[in-house]
Image: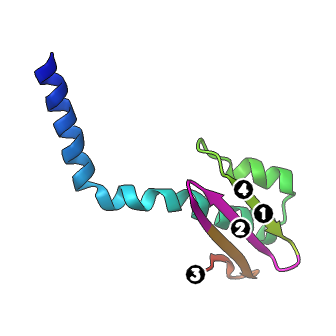
Amino acid sequence: MKRMLLLVLAGLLYWAWQERQALADFPGILSAYSAKEYCSCRFVMGFEQAYCLGYVQQWLPLSSLEENSQQRQVTAEGLGRRNQAAWQSQREGCRLLP
């Protein structure tokens, strides 16, 4: 039994090492996706805040989601990462800010 647990642990460590870049990138995906999709929902499609909040809701919750209606910008924070998206135009939609 102990040998089996060590083998499973070794396999998990090997997998984590092989996927280290993807695992490092994952935390930023939640806030980036939420900021961009919420921005598009609100400022491109013109839906209400409550609808767009439900639209971008994920299994992993965000720490915060802030909308600046005047500047048409959205800031989302989750898993320790913060991303912003801004409306460009009706044709271009929203994009993530650097």
Please report contact status of discs 4 and 1: CB closer than 8 Å, yes or no.
Answer: yes
Q: Position of residue 85 (x, y in %)?
A: 67, 73
Marks 2/4: CA distance?
Answer: 8 Å
**In the picture, which quadrant includes the N terminus?**
top left
The answer to whether residue 72 is magenta is yes
Instruction: Please rate how many residues cluster around mark 3, counting C-alpha atoms within 10 Å: few if below 14, some from 14 to 19, many from 20.
Output: few
The answer to whether residue 65 is magenta is no
Q: Secondary structure at mark 2?
A: strand
**Which mark is first along the chain, 3 or 4?**
4
Q: Judge from the rendering whether residue 76 lies leftward or rightward of residue 51; answer left or right.
A: left
Label 4 is placed on what type of residue?
A: Ser
Task: Return the mark for residue 8.
Answer: none
Which residue is denoted by mark 4 in the rendering? 64
Please report contact status of discs 2 and 4: CB closer than 8 Å, yes or no.
Answer: yes
Residue at the spot x=15%, y=19% of the render? 2
Instruction: Please rate how many residues cluster around mark 2, counting C-alpha atoms within 10 Å: few if below 14, some from 14 to 19, many from 20.
Output: many
